[in-house]
Every structure is written in structure tokens, then in C-alpha cells.
Amino acid sequence: MNPFWRDHPWWLRAVAVAFAAALVMLVQLVFPSAFAAAESVMGDLSWRLGASAEAERRVIIVDIDEASLQKLGPWPWPRETMARLSERLDEAGAAVQAFDMAFDAARPGDAALAAVWARVPVVAGQVFSLDPAVTPHAGVVGGALAAAACPAAAPVSQGYVGNTAALMAAGPAVGHLTPRTEFDGVVRKVPALVCHEGRAYPSLALASLWRAAQGPAAVPGAGAGADWQVQAQRPSLLADLTQPAWALVSPSLPGIWVPLDAQGDMRVPYRSQRSALASVSAERVLSGRVDPGLLRGAIALIGTTAFGMVDVTATPLSAVSSGVEVHAQSLAGLLDHQVPYAPRAALAWQVMAGLFGVALLLALAARRRGAPAKRLPIAGVLLALATYAGAVAVLLLQNLWLPWVAPALFMLLAATALATAEHALTRAQGERLSAHLIAYLPAPVAQRLMLTDPSGSVQVDQRNISVLAADIRNFSAFALHRNPLETAALLHAFYCIAVDVVEQHGGVVENVVGDSVLAVWNAYSDCADHPLRALQAGKELLRATRSLLARPLDSADPPVVQPLALGVGIECGQAVVGSFGPARRRAHTALGEPVGVASRLQHMTQDLSMPLLIGPQLAAQLPKQGTEHLGDYLLEGMTRQYAVYAPADWVDLVPSEQLWSRATTSSRSAAVDEAPFSAPTSAHDPQHDSQQDPHRQHGA
């Protein structure tokens, strides 16, 4: 029974796609963080590929570097030194001074530093712990939003490191320095707000941007009540495809819109190369050796890069970076309105990408030109790469962080599954084609063709073969006066019998045309007794078809319709067996004298009223007592005479129906009297013939 899927390939393809989808969902279920981790790592590559080399001058890093420590002494510096640094930055025209550090311990000189902070735009840093195992409590927390409650997405603080009360009394704005360190130690996100004791506190970048918008007239005490607000998102399918889970807006910063993910984090846009970030040594600022205009109107980020200062982190751009670079990149992204985010309906994007990819794969699978099983895996790899490239392009151009690993993996798995399905279909179709090929060609020939490439050359073998030619007498007249279905049924039964008989005796049916069958022995495999086998097959074929052909004539048949009977001619000798013609249309056949002689002997069976005739070369291979010489005849189309033989037991092969006997006797007499091409050259003894068989009394 044929498999269902072989005749319904789209069902098999649908199962292959469903299997790939189920496997992707299973991986997501078993390894929920694997896809996010892969996207994060490959997202780092996106930033490295797309980071701009254009110099960033709106945010200037004031670097407490090795040169500064050598000039001014080890860290921590006296508060008076930090106060002078703030004064120098204000004199240079910095719009905001943001400190990537917290002054949690009271020290001499706090009053001097607080006095400077009270009259310059400053954003102090503070740190929250999000780890329940780490719960510090140092300094004073400040800079809470004006809103009385925490947004639902804000992570909850487990501990804090703030600034001294003396410094907080100066009223600076405050921003937290808390990063989100991921599985590999890389900082890719920063919590936009952290919830501490029921109040929300913004990040250093948000606080610095907000403080810059207030201007110099906002001091003193400008840090209280920053007005960042969580924007309500109206759920809708179209909005979900392009809008983040959360967003922050500020009445003080019209046009600024900060997208956040479902955990309340702001993804840091690493759009500038590290070399593009402007940096000036703190000791140069203190000594007044800063380029004029470098700090004017800029946000000055005071941070440390000196060895041993602890503030070292990993970013997508470098395995070893200063934490101040994270805030610099965040500020640059906020100023450019280019903060990347994952849309709320990220799953819908994945589904659409997967459907688009599988549609292309199915189109390739359905395209029958070429080899789908070979091109589908290549297409799957290309689609996966295109999915990643598309995610990179959307990130860099539209600030959308689209999950791409799941659809890319789905395309790879779907391509592999479809390739496997197409291979199975191709194999099943090949098996079906092989079965058809064997049905229309000799089995050895069909098998050889399946193992070799098409050729336009002559491919033949010369062998000593035995040939059997069989034909149904009077079939043409029979077919003219019978229903075509009855005629086809008769031929079908005859072919089935002939093929079975030939193969049972070790032969191969070489050709089937009309009501004729041509079979060969020793043509494709060695058969030492092939003459005897061919003779036995001829006799068996006559016996096996007797009941099929010896049916009474229909009363409606005209008198010209003669009864059906089978004629068989057998001969052996040297012949060539093989294929000929151009590679696009070949013909396979057996050629040579034994083929022509066997065919003409088969035609003579009706003239001589004999069911089976044997050629001289095959008769020479048989025992003399097993054959009977009928005479020498000039066969049609031949240039010499051939001795013609019949099997000694030929009488047993003649049908017993009298109607067949009368018809064959009269036809044989007419043939001997009228057929010039079959005239004998040496006559038999008529008396001897009549004694052996009354049907041969008019024979040669």
C-alpha cells in the first residue's frame, strides 16, 4: 500500500513545519533564558558593527585617571579638592556636573564641597542594591520623584549607599548608579527607576538630563521632586507592535520619551565608539589646562578610570570599561532620542518573521526545478542570517530591539525538516519511478539506468543470446470488431501470462508491442542452458494462453474474423543488446540475426500451421530427438535459406478445438501454395508427414 504522504506532499510539509515549531517551543520551555542570552551576545556584535566614530561633545568625561592620581595623590581626594574641581567645571561652562560616585562617609571639607554644590548644577550619585543578599545602608538617599508611589515596573531596592547629610543639604539632584549586570557580566541595561521605601529614584542619566533642562536659575535645591512620570500605554494591536511596555516622560523635557522594557529597564544605546567619547583628565581641569569651549554647555561626567579604583565593568564594546562610559552612552542616547526597546508585542514580530520565512521555504520546496533537499538547508541558513541582519538594521535605524533567535532557529529547523521531507518524497517518487521504469524496461536495464548518469553514446554488449518472439494471430481483426475494453483486458491477461512464464524460465521480456512479446535469455546475466530454457518457455507460454485465446467466436462477429491463437518463434546466436540515441530520448533493444530470425519464424507459424518454430542455431543446441526438421526456407527479408524446426512434441501444443484446427489447416495450405518467401528448398516425405500428423499433409 502506498504511504499517504507520498501522494499528499503538502501534508508531509505541514508536519515538517509543525515539528520545527514544536521543537522551538520546547527549547524555549526547557531553556527559557537561552534565547535571550544568545540575542544579548549577538546584540553586542550589532553595537560593535554600528557604533559611530563621530566625536561626542555634548557629554564630556572628566576622568580621574592615573595621571590625576600621580599629580594629586591617591584616592579618595580631600573634599576641598573635589570642591575646586566643581568650581573649575562651573567656570569652564559645564551645564551639569554629574558625579559617578557617592560620598557616603563624612570627611573634613564637606562644608566646602556643599557650599559649591549649593550654587552650581550638580547631580550626585547614589547606589542601590537589587540583590537580597547584599543590603548596605550608608549615607542619605535623595532625589526621589515627585510622584508619591513607585511604578509597578520599578525594581525594589534591598540596600543603598547614599551621600552624607551635609552634602545632601546643598540640594543637588541625585541619580542612582545601579546597573543590570547580566549572565556574562556585561552591562546592557540600567534600571530607569529604583523603588526604595515606596518612592522612585531615577538613574544618573535621567537625573542629569532633567537637571540640565532646569537651567542655572533652578538652584539651590533643584534636586527635589524630579518630575519623571510613567506614561500610560493604550493597548492595541498596532500600538503593541511599535510601543514599549513602559515609557517615561517629563513635563520639564517636552519631546523626550524614554522607552522601558517590562522589567522597567532602559537599554543602553552603545552608539558611539569608545574613542568617540570625549574625555579630559581631572588634573588638567584643576590646573586650568582644558581646551577652551570643550566643557561649555556640556554635561560633565566625573568618573574614575585609574587602575585599582574598582569602577570597572564590561560593556558590549569592551570587556574592560569604566562605569562612567555606561552613563555617557545613556546620556547620548537620551539626547538623540535613540533609546532602543523591545516592543510590547515582540512575540507577534517573531511569528510574522517565522511565517514569512516558512512561506519562502515552502515555495522553494514546491518548486520542482533543481533539488529542493539540497537548496532548502542553504535557504534556511540564509534566512536565519537575514533575520539577524534585519534585527540589526531595525535596531540601528529604528531603535527596536526585536527578538530574532527564535524565528532564526525556527527557519533553520524548518528548512532541515522540509529538506528531510523533500528527500523522503524524492526517494518515494524515485522508488515509484523505478517501479514504472522496471515495468517498461527489462529489470536489469532499469537498475543500470538508476545507477548511471544519462549518456548520449552507444552502450551495447555483444552476447550469444536466445530470443523468443510470440504474437497473437488474427488479433487485429478481433480488435476491430470487439469492445476496446474487452480487447485491452485480453492483452493485459496475455502480457501478465507471458511475463510470468518468461521470468519463471530465467528470461527477460525485452519488448512488448501491440499483441507481440519479445523475450531474451543470456542477455544480461549468464545462463548456460539458455536454448533449452527458451524452448521450455515457448511451450509453457502456448499451454498457459490456450484457455485465454481459445474462446468461441461471438455470433455477431463477421465471418472474416478468425479464432485467436498464439505463434512462437525461437532462435539463438550472436546479438547486441543495449541502448542508442541522444541522452534526452533513448531506445533500448536487442539487435542481430537471432532477433530477426525469431520474429520471421513467428510469422511463419501461421503459414505452416505450427504453434512453435525453432531456428537452426537454437536447434543445434538441443538434442536431435527433441526437434523435427521441417525444411529449408528463404525467410522474408533474408538473403539465404534457413533450416526450420519444430519441437518433436508439437502436436501436444496445438489447441484441440476443431474450429482452430480447420482454420489453421486451411491457412497453412494457402500459405504453402501462395507465399513465395517461404518456399522450401528440400522437401519432406509426404507419406512420413501424413503419418505423423494429419494437419501437415499439405506441408513442405
Image (spheres, rainbow, N blue to C red):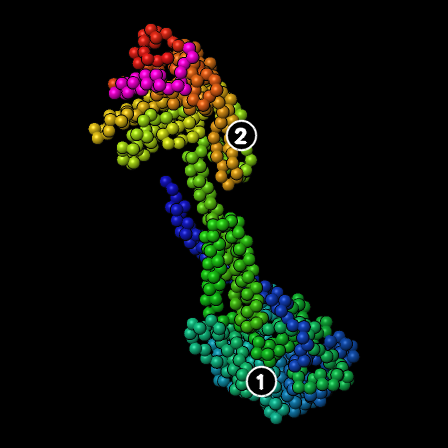
Amino acid type of the residue tagged 2 in the rendering = Val
For the residues labelled 1 and 2, the Cα–Cα distance comes to 92 Å
Amino acid type of the residue tagged 1 in the rendering = Trp
Instruction: Of the two numbered discs 1 and 2 on the same chain, state the one appearing first in sequence.
Output: 1
Q: Quadrant of residue 14?
A: bottom left
Image height of 472 relative to 395, above or below: above
Can residue 654 be spotted in the picture?
Answer: no
- Please, what secondary structure does the residue beneath circle 1 have? helix
- Residue behind mark 2: 460
687 and 462: which one is in front? Answer: 687
Place of residue 306 in the rendered image (x, y in percent of width and height, measured from the top left): 72, 74
Q: Main secondary structure of the magenta part?
A: helix
Place of residue 606 in the rendered image (x, y in percent of width and height, measured from the top left): 34, 21
446 and 653: which one is in front? Answer: 653
Place of residue 583 in the rendered image (x, y in percent of width and height, measured from the top left): 52, 39
Q: Quadrant of residue 385?
A: bottom right
Image height of 116 relative to 455, above or below: below
- What span is in magenta? 659-682
* Quadrant for the C terminus in the image: top left
- Please, what secondary structure does the residue beneath circle 2 have? strand
Direction left: furthest residue: 555
Q: Which mark is residue 425?
A: none
- Residue behind mark 1: 210
Q: Residue at x 49, y 71 (%)?
A: 343
Please tell me whether residue 681 belongs to the stretch shown in magenta: yes
* Quadrant for the N terminus in the image: top left
666 and 437: which one is in front? Answer: 666
Place of residue 10 in the rendered image (x, y in percent of width and height, measured from the top left): 41, 52
Direction right: furthest residue: 71
